[in-house]
Image (cartoon, rainbow, N blue to C red):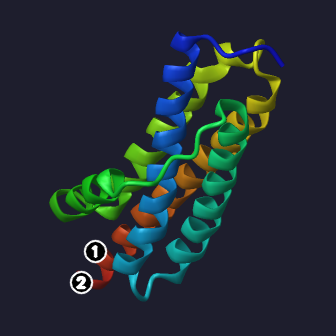
Amino acid sequence: MEEINHKDMKKLLKWQQFILDMAFAMQDLTKDMEGQKIFIEPMKKHSAEMYANAKTLQKVTGQELQATDKEARDGRKTIKYFSLRRLFSVMSGTIKEDARYHEIYVKNYPAIKTVIDSERRIAESVKRLEERAKKQKEIHKKLGLK
């Protein structure tokens, strides 16, 4: 593999940081989903996969980064002011767009193809979680629950 130019390095490091932050957020937000096992288990699985993606990017960039709680804080705000369904909608869209945006780097850095494929799978799965949350809300509404 060739040497990474400065411009690509900046973009890949930013992407690596986003993936780490998103993985941390997925893991951290499960604490707020007490009693909703249908959401907790997939989120933990996705978090682990995102951490693996960050490790793959770390091999490409050669830089080890630390996760921050930025995405987790944003996620809590989304749940508080909107809903869990909206959180899943935003996460799904963001992850999918992130994968699409970084496709251009596959030609020069083939190792990230697995990261992009993984992000697409995760985005689709989180989209399904959004649908589950929507159905759950409709059922609760019919039953007169919160």
The circle on residue 99 is none
Residue visible at 84% across and 19% down?
Answer: 1
Q: Which residue is mark 2?
A: 144
Q: Taking 22 as reference, is 109 left or right?
A: right
Which amino acid type corresponds to the residue marked 2 in the rendered image? Gly
Q: Which residue is mark 1?
A: 141
Residue 6 drawn above or below residue 83: above
Q: Position of residue 48 (x, y in %)?
A: 64, 63
Q: Position of residue 59 (x, y in %)?
A: 73, 39
Tag 1 and tag 2, C-beta contact below 8 Å: yes
Q: Position of residue 8 (x, y in %)?
A: 57, 15
Q: Picture quarter containing residue 118?
A: top right
109 or 145: nearer the eye? 109
Which amino acid type corresponds to the residue marked 1 in the rendered image? Lys
Quote the CA–CA distance across marks 1 and 2.
5 Å
Residue visible at 33% across and 78% down?
Answer: 140
Residue visible at 52% across and 31% down?
Answer: 13
Q: Which quadrant, please, contains the C terminus?
A: bottom left
Residue visible at 60% across and 68% down?
Answer: 42
